[in-house]
Structures are given as structure tokens and as C-alpha cells.
Image (cartoon, rainbow, N blue to C red):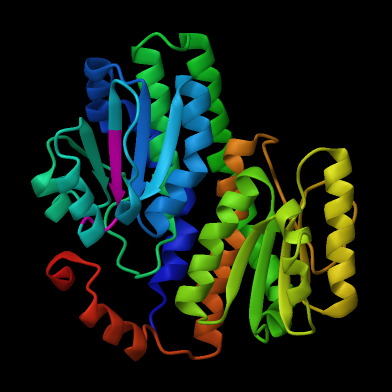
């Protein structure tokens, strides 16, 4: 069985660097629209992996542009507020039916569509369009499409902020340099994640259900990680913000539950999260802390994944998403699971999610 997903997973640092190198030209349509509209609020609209990317990127856009940034599922766009709202539609495949419907509902509001493919149904109907920069991703479950979407939205914010005078040229340079560092770190983190998988492969292929727990950018990446596990390994997978997990969901813990715990936050929070992972290990042998290299206790545990981190919350999605992405790429191949699902095909034939069924 070909494993396109694994190949895309490995390609992420090269793709993201290429996007960074060509950032000014790539996001120019957004920059020009932003400067022309002078929005006072931005709405990020999408579905599935696109929505997960928008939720990961929104806090950074708020910080850089100093304005409210809201995310919404394409099928549930609330009433737009603000005197000059700007809508960003994100769709990697470019044919999501609910995004097309949202575009039609909001056609009187200034908007731009961002897609993975240059030519697609959404692009044909958009007044303003740009690409994510990763090209077409032929694997169904998106990997490079997710991280590329997050980076693309970051760059939209930075280029628009620079062009509109919201940030200085020196600060812009610092922000771009940090993104280059995060992308370069991915090369080492890919290798570390593969080593972690090989150390724990026998156990990782036996897990019957997952929970992914983190804070901030880790929590955002965990949402996407669960979607990848659900789409490929086809077992239950849930993600929770750390404190929310403690308020009830821990009742799910049993010997079959695999837990991936992203250790982050301030010193006190990190200690509590380490204790959570240790407590999970008392009930289940599937307890995997994700720690900062050299910065967290327990990094020598063979079940721990020690990552190189920048220390900034907005780069954590590039770091934290790698482990569940690799699980989604490798475990189905090892277990010889069929790609796709007759049940999924039946549901989508009744309730299509792609324009013209993706043709």
C-alpha cells in the first residue's frame, strides 16, 4: 500500500521553507485587500483540517494585527459584527460544499478565499483568491496542508501588519526569523518523532482509543491530531485543554486508553501535567509525555518524546502535531488497515461534502 501521507509528513520542513521564502508574493492578494478594506474584525471560516488550522492561527493574528479575529465552521457562521468585517475562507481541497454555501451567504462582505489548489470550484467563485502554497495533497487526511495553512495565515498577518504600519520593519524581521527557526526545528523534530515511534511501535499499534491533552498551541494541534487518528486508525480520539480534562473527562481512563500529554505552560502547570502523565501510567501502559528537550523532567523515559521548541506558543502547532500525524501515517500501514471506509462513502453519498462529489 502506498503511503502518501507519510511522504507528505516528511516533506513539511521543505514545503514550509518554500512558503516562507516566497511569502511576499504569495500573500500579496490578502495584503492588498486588507489595506484597501481596513477591516476592524476578521472572520476565519472553514471546515475540518482548515478550521483546525484557523483555530490554531487566530490568537497570533489577533496579536499581530491588534484586532478581534473570530473562527467559525463554514456551516455555522454567526452574524458578522464590526463596521468593516473581512472574511477569510480557507479550504485545502477547494470544493467544500458548506464553504461554498457560506461564500454565497456572505457575498456582500469583503472576502478572500485561500485554497491548496490553484484552480478549483471555490477559486472560480471567489472575488479574491490566493493559494496556501503547499500544492495539491493527494493523501486524503491532510498533513502538510495543516501546517502550511497555519503558516500561511501567520504570513498574511505579518505582511498586512507591515504594509499597514501596524508593526515596524525590525519587529517584522524578528517574527520572520522565528518562523524560520521553527521550520528548521521541524527537521530535527521529525527525526525525534520517528525514533520515538520506533521505540514504542509495539505498544502504539495496540491502542484502542486516544486522548490528547495540552495547553495553548499544543491544545490546538491536538484537535488536528485527533482528526488524523480518527480518519486513519479509525478508533476514538479526543482532545482536551489540560484543565478541562481534569474537570470530568479523566473518568474515561482505563487500561486501553492511550494518552499523549503535551507538557507546557508555566512552571507550576508543567509540574501538574507531568503528574497527570504519571498518574495515567498507573492505569494504562500507554502514557506518552511530550516534553521540551533539556527542559522537563522525565525526558529520559523511553515513552517520552523530547522536542526542540522555540519557547513561543504560536510555533507549538508545528511541533505538537508531528506525533499524531505520524501515528496516522504509520499505524494503519503496519496493521494493514484499509484506506477509506464503506460507511464513510455511504454517508457522503447521502450528504455530499464536496462540490460535484469532488470530481
Q: Position of residue 244 (x, y in %)?
A: 71, 55
Q: Is 356 on the left-hand or right-hand side of 210?
A: left
- In the rendered image, the vertical position of residue 1 relative to residue 95, given as above or below: below
Residue occupying the point 71% across, 75% down: 258
Q: Between 345 and 181, which is closer to the camera in this rendering?
A: 345
- 237 on left or right of 101: right
Secondary structure mostly seen in magenta is: strand
Q: Is residue 281 above or below residue 164?
A: below
Q: Which residues are magenta?
A: 87-94
Image quadrant occupied by the C terminus: bottom left
State the residue at coordinates (48%, 17%): 172
Residue 187 falls inside the magenta stretch = no
Residue drawn at (22%, 73%), measured in percent from left and top?
Answer: 352
Question: x, y (%) of residue 139?
Answer: 35, 69
Q: Position of residue 303 (x, y in %)?
A: 80, 69
Q: How many marks?
A: 0
State the image coordinates of residue 355 (x, y, percent, origin top left): 15, 65
Residue 332 position (above or below residue 239): below
Q: Is residue 108 found left or right of 24 in the rendered image? A: left
* Relative height, residue 34 to residue 56 (above, below): above
In-front residue for pair 52/249: 249
Does residue 147 appear in the picture of this structure? no
Q: State whether residue 110 appears in this view.
A: yes
Q: Which residue sits furthest left?
A: 124
| Quadrant assignment for the N terminus | bottom left
Question: Residue at 86% of width from left, 73% of height from top?
Answer: 281
Nearer to us in this view, 94 or 169:
94
Amino acid at each position: 500500500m502506498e503511503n502518501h501521507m507519510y511522504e507528505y509528513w516528511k516533506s513539511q520542513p521543505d514545503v514550509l521553507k518554500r512558503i516562507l521564502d516566497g511569502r511576499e508574493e504569495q500573500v500579496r492578494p490578502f495584503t492588498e485587500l486588507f489595506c484597501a478594506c481596513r477591516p476592524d474584525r476578521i472572520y476565519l471560516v472553514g471546515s475540518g483540517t482548515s478550521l483546525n488550522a484557523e483555530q490554531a492561527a487566530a490568537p497570533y493574528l489577533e496579536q499581530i494585527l491588534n484586532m478581534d479575529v473570530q473562527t467559525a465552521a463554514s456551516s455555522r457562521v454567526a452574524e458578522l459584527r464590526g463596521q468593516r468585517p473581512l472574511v477569510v475562507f480557507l479550504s485545502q481541497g477547494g470544493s467544500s460544499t458548506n464553504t461554498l454555501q457560506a461564500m454565497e451567504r456572505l457575498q456582500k462582505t469583503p472576502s478572500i478565499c485561500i485554497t491548496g489548489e490553484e484552480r478549483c470550484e471555490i477559486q472560480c467563485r471567489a472575488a479574491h483568491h490566493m493559494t496556501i502554497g503547499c500544492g495539491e495533497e493527494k493523501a486524503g487526511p491532510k498533513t502538510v496542508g495543516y501546517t502550511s495553512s497555519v503558516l500561511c495565515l501567520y504570513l498574511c498577518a505579518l505582511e498586512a501588519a507591515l504594509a499597514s504600519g501596524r508593526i515596524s520593519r525590525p519587529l517584522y524581521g524578528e517574527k520572520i526569523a522565528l518562523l524560520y527557526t521553527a521550520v528548521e526545528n521541524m527537521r530535527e523534530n521529525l527525526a525525534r518523532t520517528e525514533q520515538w515511534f520506533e521505540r514504542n511501535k509495539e505498544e502504539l499499534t495496540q491502542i484502542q482509543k486516544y486522548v490528547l491533552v495540552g495547553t495553548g498551541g499544543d491544545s490546538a494541534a491536538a484537535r488536528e491530531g485527533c482528526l488524523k487518528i480518527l480518519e486513519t486508525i479509525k478508533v476514538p480520539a479526543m482532545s482536551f485543554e489540560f484543565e478541562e480534562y481534569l474537570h470530568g473527562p479523566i473518568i474515561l481512563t482505563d487500561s486501553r486508553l492511550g494518552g499523549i500529554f503535551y507538557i507546557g505552560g508555566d512552571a507550576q502547570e508543567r509540574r501538574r501535567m507531568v503528574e497527570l502523565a504519571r498518574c495515567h501510567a498507573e492505569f494504562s501502559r500507554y502514557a506518552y509525555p511530550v516534553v521540551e528537550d533539556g527542559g522537563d523532567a522525565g525526558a529520559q523515559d523511553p515513552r517520552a518524546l523530547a522536542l526542540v521548541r522555540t519557547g513561543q506558543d504560536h510555533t507549538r502547532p508545528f511541533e505538537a502535531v508531528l506525533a499524531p500525524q505520524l501515528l496516522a501515517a504509520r499505524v494503519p500501514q503496519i496493521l494493514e488497515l484499509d484506506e477509506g471506509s464503506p460507511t464513510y462513502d455511504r454517508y457522503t453519498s447521502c450528504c455530499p461534502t464536496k462540490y460535484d462529489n469532488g470530481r
